[in-house]
Image (cartoon, rainbow, N blue to C red):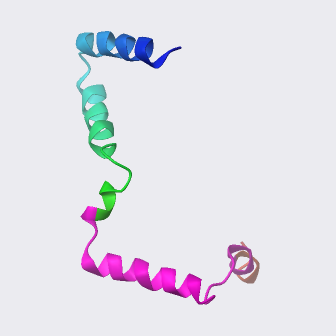
């Protein structure tokens, strides 16, 4: 289906939609889909620093592969 036709179909469906739960869900999807990097603006300074530490650990090869941890703990 072409996106133009799909958009028209969805618009028509949305104008007739009465279910509040579905509308609330669609609002969440719309708000979350602004741009791919918007979620980063919600992080605290502590969270950002933690991510940066983790990335530095990866760059400096201070990481343990997932499989090694699973094996060590019998998972």
Q: Residue at x 74, y 74 (%)?
A: 67
Q: Which residue is drawn at 33% across and 38% down?
A: 29
The location of residue 42, given as percent across then percent down, is 25, 63
Q: Which residue is drawn at 25% across and 33% down?
A: 24
Q: In this view, does 37 lie above or below 67?
A: above
The location of residue 9, given as percent across then percent down, is 38, 11
In which image quadrant can residue 50 be found? bottom left
Toward the viewer: 67 or 8?
A: 8
In which image quadrant can residue 16 be found? top left
Q: Residue at x 24, y 12 (%)?
A: 15
Toward the viewer: 42 or 17?
A: 42
In which image quadrant can residue 53 be found? bottom left
Principal SS element in the magenta part? helix
The location of residue 28, given as percent across then percent down, is 28, 40
Q: Is residue 57 magenta?
A: yes
Side (left or right) of 28 relative to 55? left
Q: What stretch is highlighted in magenta?
A: 41-69
Side (left or right) of 31 relative to 51? left
Q: In this view, does 22 lie above or below 44?
A: above
Q: Does the magenta stretch include residue 12?
A: no
């Amino acid at each position: 289906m072409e996106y133009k036709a799909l958009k028209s179909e969805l618009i028509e469906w949305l104008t007739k939609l009465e279910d509040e739960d579905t509308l609330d869900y669609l609002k969440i999807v719309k708000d979350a889909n602004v741009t791919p990097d918007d979620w980063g603006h919600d992080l605290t300074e502590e969270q950002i620093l933690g991510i940066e530490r983790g990335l530095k650990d990866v760059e400096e090869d201070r990481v343990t592969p997932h499989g090694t941890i699973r094996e060590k703990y019998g998972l």
